[in-house]
Every structure is written in C-alpha cells, then in structure tokens.
Image: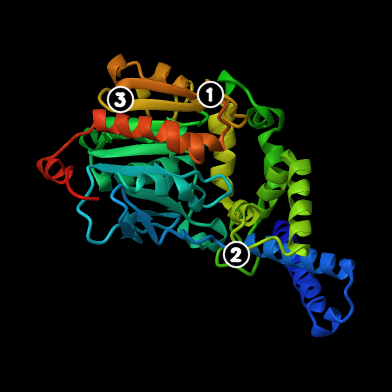
Amino acid sequence: MKYMAMYDWMETVRNTNQWLGASARALTSYPATAAMPNPMLDWVRAWGEVTERSFSRMTVKPDWDIAHFTNAKGQDRLVEPRVVMARDFGDLLHFHIPGRKKKRHKVLLAAPMSGHYATLLRSTVLSLLPDCEVYITDWHNARDIPVSAGKFDVEDYTLYLADFMRELGPETHVVAVCQPVPLALAATAYLAQENPDAQPASLTLIGGPVDPDANPTDVTDFGHSVSMGQLHETMIQRVGFKYKGVGRKVYPGLLQLSSFISMNLEKHAAAFGDQIARVARDEAGDHDKHNVFYDEYLAVMDMTAEFYLSTVERIFKEREIARNCFTVNSTKVDISKITDVAVKIVEGENDDISGPGQCLAALDLLTGLPDAKKASHLEPGAGHYGIFAGRKWRENIRPLVIDFMASNARTTSTDAANSNSAA
C-alpha cells in the first residue's frame, strides 16, 4: 500500500502544480488587473500559463496530429490512423492513405517503450509516408491496463513484435528505434526458428543497446551501478485508485520524467525561464518551438515493473542479447539463425544514450548472414534524436534507409504493379 500511496502522492503534486498554474493565470487575467499595468503581474500570468500547460501535459497521450502530408507531386493526401491488431499492452497501427494504391515498401516502426509514447516518432512517420505503407507499435500506458491483463516483460514485448511481423508478412521492412533494437533482433531470430516464412525482408536498427558494454554511457553505467533490489525498492510503485490499472506494479512515468530532466537540469530550467519571459512579452504561441518540443517530452507513460526490471537485468546487466543467450518461453533464441534478412545499423557519432558501437555489435552476432546483406552507417555529428528525427534523419539517413529497403525488397506481382503508381 505504501507504493500505491506514493503513486497517488506524485499525482497529487502534479495536479496541485497544474491547479496553481491555472489559478495564477486566472487571477492575473481579470479585467481589473489591466487597469494596473505591472510587469510583475505579467510575469505571474506567464508563469501560470507555462506551469499549467506543462503539468497538464504529463498525463495526456499526445495526438498523432498527422492529418495529411504532401507527396512528391505537391498533392495533399489525407492520413487516417487505423488499428490493425488490438492487444492489451499495445496496438499495431497503420497510417492509411485513402485513395492511394499500396506503396511498395511496407514499414513496421518498432517504437520505444521507454517513458514516452510512440508519438515521439511522429516526424519519422511523416517522413516515411510519401514512399511507404507505415505501421507502428502503439504501446499503451500501463496505468490504464487492468491487472487482469497479466504481465508484460521483455519476452512478451518480443512476442508482440513477432506477432506484428507475422501479421504484416515477409515483405515487411522493420525499423527499430533505440530501446526495441535488441528485442527486434531477437524477434526476427525467433521467427527464423519458429516461422521462417514470416521473417521480414529487412531490419534497420537505429541507435539501440545490443551490447551496452561496447561503448558505455551514463545510461549503461547506471544499469551496472545499482542492484535489482535497489531498483525495485526505489523505482517501482503500484498504480493508484484514479486509473484502471489500480494495483499494477509500474515504473511511473512521472518518476521517469524526473530522471530525464535531472540529466540536463540546467538546460531545461533555462528553457522554461526563457519561455516564461516570451509569454510575458506576448511573443509565444501554441505551436512555437518550445511548446512543440515539451508537449511531447513531458507526456510520459508508466511502464510495467516487469518490463523495466527485466530490461535492466537481462539486456544491460546480463547482456543476454550481446551474449546470444536470450530466451523466450524457455526457448533459446539463436541470432545466428537469421540467414536471409538484410540488416542495416544506424548510429550517431555523438549519441550519449546508445553510444556508437552498441548497435553495431549486432552484425557480429549475425554469423549466419552473408556480408552482402549487412550494412552500417555512422552519422557524423548526430546525437541520439538526430538519427531518427530532424534534418540529419531527413536529408542523410532516411534516403539511405529507403535505398536499403529497395535493394532488399521481396516483391510480389501486386507490389510490382503498384510500385509505379501515383503517390
């Protein structure tokens, strides 16, 4: 019960700050205050607006906000997110383009389950839509999943990915970003053993910890510096009475967010101070750079306790993927069984979360895969987010990934007929 009380206490603190911000904004926005011009009132109003917005975003899943995109011919195309497979802990989501013939490249984006929602990859999705049929793993917030749904750990995550790959078929190109990289590799190997015909055509692994010890960072060092008992005692809580998942053990999103912010506390403090000043001067807007970034960054989701703890123990501490001794349902998953799935590694030179070399280690495990089906790219000057979003992704990395898919496509007669269709 003490962990449930702690969960509810954190939610109470968040709710209180949201209320304080709303109250400050309301009290300084009365018409009477306009008759008494005072810079301090403007500052309090700005503080209230920024505070209310920030704390309210922490419990709201962001919208995909992809209503349309412009294709190569300058035409606007509508986008309809549709659930293809609905599961307890996450859905397989398709970004359907009404009226457009199926594109040749069918892409499954394996989104991270590491604190933020799959919408973190919104810009990645948008950049792929003109050339691909885009699907994504849309993970659910653990606080909203009843205890009756059971557990969800790294093995379950791997099986979800394998099921999604089976659903989409062998012409699929899987792109895994960050945390799911080692599990996407394991899911592919699992299919190679259990259902070879369901393996994807290619696997693009972007900045993930296949071997965390290949180039240690602060993130990997943390995994080695604490015991599993310490993590369970300090990080795990039970969902409070407000949500459907009441009683479920989780690593709370609010606790994760505090860790994210503490890593760059001065930078975030300066960003919020600058935003308050801009709001006070009426220079800010709903869609300015600050709000676009922090509306997503502050929206966090709870992870199931078993997923978080098994990730730390099995991926980081025991290095089961790196040592090729990962098991699913008591069956060893042998990565060397992957023999005909093309694999491309993408890393960022300045990645301080998954350092260069951590993801590249996957190629050494693929002993059964011909060298002709292996590729890698190190993006100069790119940090972690730059290798899947932003200018470096759009201008340098995305074209390489599309070319890699095209070179390793498993085409059907229907695909070939549609490949030359208008976007």
Looking at marks 2 and 3 on the same chain, the residue that comes earlier in the sequence is marked by 2
Q: Tag 2: residue type? A: Val
Judge left or right: residue 356 versus residue 396: right
The reply to whether residue 269 is in sight is yes
Image marks 2 and 3: residues in contact by CB distance under 8 Å: no
Residue 332 drawn above or below residue 52: above
Secondary structure under tag 1 reads loop
Q: Which quadrant of the structure image shows residue 11?
A: bottom right
| 3 or 1: mark nearer the eye | 1
Mark 2 vs mark 3, foreground winner is 3
Mark 3 closeness class: few <14, some 14–19, many ≥20 residues within 10 Å: many
The three-letter amino acid code for the residue at tag 1 is Pro
Viewer-side residue, 125 vs 5:
125
Give the CA distance from mark 3 to mark 1. 29 Å
Q: Which residue is mark 2?
A: 246
Q: Position of residue 39 (x, y in %)?
A: 88, 66
Give the residue at x 39% y 43%. Answer: 109
Q: Identify the residue shown where x is 28% and y is 50%.
A: 73
- Label 3, on which residue? 338
Q: Amino acid at mark 3?
A: Ile
Callout 1 environment at 10 Å: few (<14), some (14 to 19), or many (20+)?
A: few
Name the residue tied to disc 1: 380
Mark 3–mark 1 contact, CB under 8 Å?
no
Determine the CA span between mark 1 and mark 2.
Answer: 46 Å
Tell me residue 362's x, y (percent). Answer: 43, 23
- The relative height of residue 371 versus residue 98 in the rendered view (above or below) is above
Answer few, some or many: residues within 10 Å of disc 2's Cα (few below 14, many 20 plus, some between 14 and 19).
some
